[in-house]
Image (cartoon, rainbow, N blue to C red):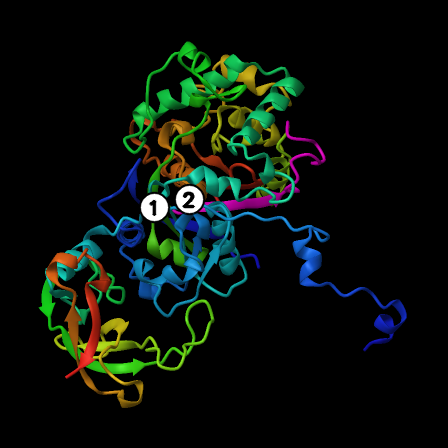
Amino acid sequence: MSEVVKVFGGTALSEKDISSGKIFLTKDSLDCAYAWDTGVAINRYLAELKKGNIIATRCRKCKRIVLPPRLFCELCFIPVNDWVYVHDSGVINTFSICHVHWDASRVKAGEDPHLPAVIEIDGASPGMGIMHLLGEVKPAKIKIGMKVKAVWRPEAERTGSITDIKYFKPI
Amino acid sequence: MNKRVAIVGLGHSGFGTTSPDLSYREMIFEAATRCYEDAGGIHPQSIDSFVASSEDFMEGISIADEYVPDQLGAVLKPVHSIAGDSLQGLASAMMQIKTGQQNIVAASSFSKVSNLSNHEHLISYATDPAYIRPFNENPYFIAGLEMNRYLHETGTTREQCAAVVVKNKYNALNNPGAVYAAKVELEDITTAPYLSAPLGIFDMSGHLDGSIVILLASEDKAWELTDKPIWINGIGWATDTPNLDSRLEGLGSARYAKLAAEKAYRMAGITNPFHEIDFAEIDDTFSYKELQHLEALNICGPGEAGQLLELGCFAPGGDFPVNVSGGSLGCGYLHEANGLQRVAETVRQLRKEAGKRQLPEAETGLAFAWRGVPTATGAAVVLSTRP
């Protein structure tokens, strides 16, 4: 305890001081709504996911086949319009086991943790892939380099979203 | 620190009330491609650094800076964002060259305001949560307060403000990139419903989507990239207190504009802006703002702008043409990209590339941007064909 605190003491605040209105807070909850234009490239990516396909683009200069598809190569800085289907399988490049939910509460015993992973997709250039989730696998069994395949939602449930793929499972 | 800095490239894309065909990335890529081609076809690999101007709330992405590189060709290059008007971003880009750190720097900005479904809320969130927001007003009441006090202090009339709208929308008819061009009469403006009196619905500029990229270079590099460099001879910016109720000069004047301009004029060696500058592209987010800003920028004295406007002084054929492009009232309002819109138009005039709206005498021009309500931030730049 510093000299100043010893001399002047002070009064500790409690949760009750705040809830009873003794301490003033200004509260507001922000109401923001956006609808982002997906544009040409992501629009087609999502439309193909709805059909159960993964589509990528290839740069005519550097020859990279990239995901998600894009209308320009960010390295060569030229337009891109060469569309190629890639496989819905690949290899785990890296993964993590989420022991906390997004609200910081801990995953309970017996509850399946979320398993985000970067999957290098077969048919895309080395290192190119999709950030997605793993499923139907015990966390302890997951290895970098493991082969995985997409598990799709039933066609009727797909909405044109990255979540049209439920997760990737080991094969 | 004495390096001269020039604008050597200019590109835009996507001007429209909506732009559903392109993502913001695709839109900016198009503007950047045009800009780099305009600068002799430079590849972004040869650009040293990149400055974007944005406001995360407008984009709906926090730390939006991280989304800048790809579409500008800036992957693994020095990149940073200015949370301010893009004219402040231009100043930042210029300083990087002035210090000798970089030789070629790109400044970019864009608006996808059509992607916001309740943009008034976002403007409102810029007001203080403890003592302004609880009133729960549409935030444009601030423009109403400003306009009322400005008219009161200067004797400027409602009709003179409406005349700004008539002029700028008419000027915009000669600008193929202007979305809000129209031939309207004074009565169309003055009899329109109020937004927040005395401000009417047509006294406010309409929203615009679009992207602008501008390339800057040091003097030696500038001549390699273009045969018509436009020199940044002076630049300045200032921000007043955010308090709506305790500004030094109140809401009637635009002291931020006065201070920004004084700094830019001093740097450019300008003592009489009306005589030494040929034309201006200045903020007209609201009709009264053009008049208020003209006075703050010392183009004329307090309370004189309205009368000079009526005498035709600010028309394309007048002594001091203002917003020949159509301004924001005629072209649309690009939010943080607004400053670069004013700069781009000034550069087009100075390069003699303004088509039907080209002014015969355009050697030195002034561009001025304001960040809109509820801000008190402005930035001014003096551009010239002569360093």
Whether residue B274 appears in this view of the structure is no
- Whether labels 1 and 2 belong to a single chain: the reply is yes
The local crowd at label 1, few if under 14, some if 14 to 19, many if 20 or more residues have their Cα within 10 Å, is many
**Numbered badge on residue B211:** 1
Residue drawn at x 43%, y 41% as measured from the top left? B335
Residue B67 shown left or right of residue B126 in the figure: left
Q: Position of residue B382 (x, y in %)?
A: 51, 40
Q: How far is disc 1 from disc 2 in space, using C-alphas? A: 7 Å
Q: Position of residue B90 (x, y in %)?
A: 47, 50
Span colored in magenta: B229-252
Q: Label 2 marks which chain's residue?
A: B
Q: Is residue B212 magenta?
A: no
- Does the CB distance between marks 1 and 2 fall below 8 Å? yes
Q: Nearer the viewer, residue A96 or A25?
A: A25
SS label for mark 1: strand
Residue A157 in which image quadrant = bottom left
Residue drawn at x 27%, y 73% as measured from the top left? A133
The residue type indicated by label 1 comes to Ser
Residue, disc 2: B337
Whether residue B321 appears in this view of the structure is yes
Q: Position of residue A112 (x, y in %)?
A: 32, 78
The residue type indicated by label 2 comes to Ala
Q: Nearer the viewer, residue B53 or A145?
A: A145
Q: Label 1 marks which chain's residue?
A: B
